[in-house]
Each structure stands twice: as structure tokens, then as C-alpha cells.
Image (cartoon, coloured by chain):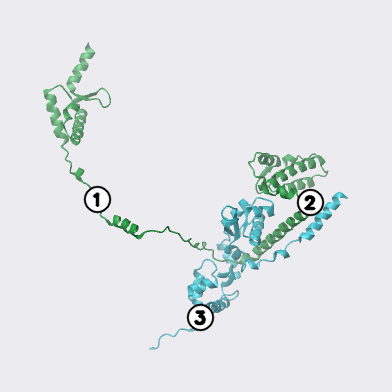
Chain colours: A green, B cyan
Amino acid sequence: MTTHVRELELDLDAFEGPFDLLLTLVLREELEPAEVDVAGIVVAFVERLAEREQLDLEACGEFLVLVAALLELKARALFPDEEAELADLEPEEATEELARRLAEYRRMKEAAAWLSERLAQERTRYFRLGPAPLAPRPERRLAPQEPERLAAALRALAEPPPEVSVAHLGLRFPPVSQFVRRFRSLLGRRRRFDFDAEVRDLPRVEQAVAFLALLELRRSGEVALEQAAPFAPIRVSRQDVEREAAWTVRSA
Amino acid sequence: MDRPLRLISTNPVDRLARTVEALLVVASAPLSVDELVGAAADDADRIETALRLLADRYREGRSGIVLEQVAGGWAFRASREAAEACARLFERPVERGLSQAALETLAIVAYLGPCSRPEIARIRGVAADSTVAGLVERGLVAEAGREDGAVGSVRYRTTPLFDRVFALESAAALPRLDDLGDSTAAIRERLESVAARKTA
């Protein structure tokens, strides 16, 4: 029975899944090699090996090659600047440097263990946790200012605002009925008239009221409206005239 | 009945102790002697006398509230005999689920801080970004400037909350680093013996 290295299931902080996928992700730069706990992978592999009765040398060889490559990638990612510095070391110096680093890490692991024990001992200590105290506010440095400019600015603020014109509120709107009557009498005399020509001389407000009167007459079916194109003159005609014209066209 | 009501204690230090007691009740973090001096407008010696008085009054076995010297100051906490009851009602969210990686990172920051994430990564051999972010979120470490002025990596240090959670009077209360772990010489010896076995 062979050990399929690439199918090795991993459960690391940064990754969970088969070793093969982890390598793919690292090579595609979707996973930072620096995030990968290589020791965790080695432990998983060794555990897998321990489950087998025979030592699978082929799998070991493949694993060594893969994990060494991963380790190199990770080392380059973690210590980009140290490559040259470390390459110059003599073997003895390198051993010394490695020992120094291992000792440093070992001490930190021991310190972490001490903290962990301490936490366990202090589990029975309860205290009130409030929000962090307000940080002292950094002193704001202001550019030198002239008091006269401040006074001028304040004076401008203190001045009463300009009177708001309410002239438009005084507009007088003639009643719609006035135009309704006017248009009716107009159509009494003429069959058609041009709306635009009729209201041309009126003020804008009255033109609007006249237009409302026109709509009113259209709604009650007294007039028919025609407009060749948007904004073209509106032609107003008596409804019976329109009907007559339609009948003439149909009967023709 | 004409005489005014006589206070049980008219000792001025006792009165100061009541003020200090009040300040400690209101505070959400340990108060240093200096802060108490400023707030109570009294001198440091008398504040310390008042604190000793209060520490005796609020001690384990005598009171449900205990006055302790922690994180560079003085603070009240629940007595240990009330821990079980406290546990039924309150959580300790700051330290809940601290991973091994988080503890190692915390140790590095506590001993070597202020230090940057690259420095932590160099010692642990794993990128420290997410672990440090988690510790910052818990309030156990905080930013402390940058390396080489404004352009370098952000450096981190442990917070007063760290001292408080681990019941440390200050960072000086941590065990000496030299007393922890094997010495470099011992590790070197082991490395060399492994190398010798390989070549043999």
C-alpha cells in the first residue's frame, strides 16, 4: 500500500485540505507561503507514515522534495533581505546562527507556556472591563491668524441676511372660468382658433391659466385640440366641427 | 440632641481613603498613584497610606471585592471565592480561545516589544499578520510607533490590559528570559551531535 503524498489531508491554521491543493494554491500565489505552517505538514506526514507498517521510501522521497521546495519558498518570502547575508556564512557560523535563532524561539515558546499556565492560574480573577480610557488628544497646531480677519468674518455673520423677496406670492391668478368663458365665446364666433396666437400678449401666469381652461374644455368634450409636433402651435376647434370633418373624410 | 451628629471617623487619612475608594470604583482601568494624587489633590505618601488601608480592608477572605496592585496601578476585582458565581454570569472574552500562535506572539511582544510583525515572523517562522491583528482586537497589544520613523513597519507593545489579564504588576513581573528555554550553547551542542550522527 503506497502513501499518496499529494493526497495527505492537512488541517493547518491557514489551510485545510489535501497537500496537493495547498501546493497548487502556493504556486498560483493565492496562498502566502509565509502563512503555511511547514512543521504542521511534516507532523501530519509523519503521523500518516506511522500508521503504515512498512516504510514507503518513494513517498518519503517525494515528500522531502515537495516540502523542501515549499520551505525554500517560505524562507524567501519571510526573509527576502537575508538571502545574501546568510549565504556568506561559513558552515560553523551558520550553525551558530541557527542555534541562536532556535534558542530564541525556544525561549519564546517557554514564555508562551508560562503565559498559558498563568492564565490557567488566574482563571478565577474577575474584574471589570471598561472601554479603553480616552487617548490624549494631540495638540492641534494652528497657523498664525490675524484677529482682524476673525472679527471681519464674525461681522459678516452678524449682519442681517438680505430680505427675501416675496413678490411672487403677490401674483394674481385670473380664474380658469374666465378663460373658459372667453374661449367658448370665441368658438361661438369662429370654428377654429390658434391658441398660441390668442394668448401671445398675456403674461406667463395668465397663459398657464388659459392652458388649464383649454384642458378643461377638452375634458368636457367641447373642443378638439390639434398639434402637428411638440411645441408647434395648438389649434383649437369646436368638437362638432371636428366630427363633421371626420364624417366628410369617411364618407368621401 | 443639640450636639451635631459626630462622624464615626474623623481621621483625615480615612477620609482620603474614602475618596480613593470612590475613584477606584468609578475607574474602568487600574489607577496609578500619580493619577490618584492628581484626582484626590493630595500627596503621594498619604495616598499610599490610604491604599494600604484599603488593601487591608479589601482583601481575600475579608471582602467580596479585592484591591490589587496590577498593570502599574491599583484596581478592584472580585474575590476568588466568588469566581464560580462570576463565571455563571460573566465571560472572560479577552483570553478565551487564545491559540498557541497567539500566546507565542504575545510572549514575543511582551519580552521584545515594541517589535514589528516582520520581527515576530522572523522568530516564529510564520507570518504574524493575522495573529497580531487578533491580539490588537482583543486589546492585548497595541501599536507603538514605527521602525525608522514614519516609513518603517508598525511596532507593537503589550497593553495595560495584558498586564491585568495575566495579573502582572508590570512587565518586570515576567520571568527572566534567560531562565526560560535551553541556552544557545546547549542547542548548538545538540545540532552538532545530530550532524555528527548523520555523517558517521
| Quarter-of-image position of residue B88 | bottom right
Where does label 2 land, which residue? A90
- Which mark is nearer the camera, 1 or 2? 2
Circle 2: residue type: Glu
Between the C-alphas of marks 1 and 2, the distance is 86 Å
The three-letter amino acid code for the residue at tag 1 is: Pro
Reading the image, the residue beneath label 3 is B14
Q: Quadrant of the C terminus of chain A?
A: top left
Indicate the quadrant where residue B64 lies: bottom right
Measured as percent of width and height from the top left, residue B161 is found at 58, 63
Which of the 4 image quarters holds residue A201?
A: top left
For the residue labelled by badge 2, is the local secondary structure a helix, a strand or a loop?
loop
Up/down of A37 relative to A251, above or below: below
Q: Residue A229: x percent and y percent?
A: 27, 24
- Front of the two marks 3 and 1: 1
Image x and y of residue A55, in percent: 82, 43
Q: Position of residue A38 (x, y in %)?
A: 71, 47
Find disc 1 in the rendering and name its residue. Answer: A162
| Left or right: where A155 falls relative to B42 | left
| Residue at the image position 49 percent from the left and 69 percent from the top | B26
Position of A121 compared to A63: left or right? left
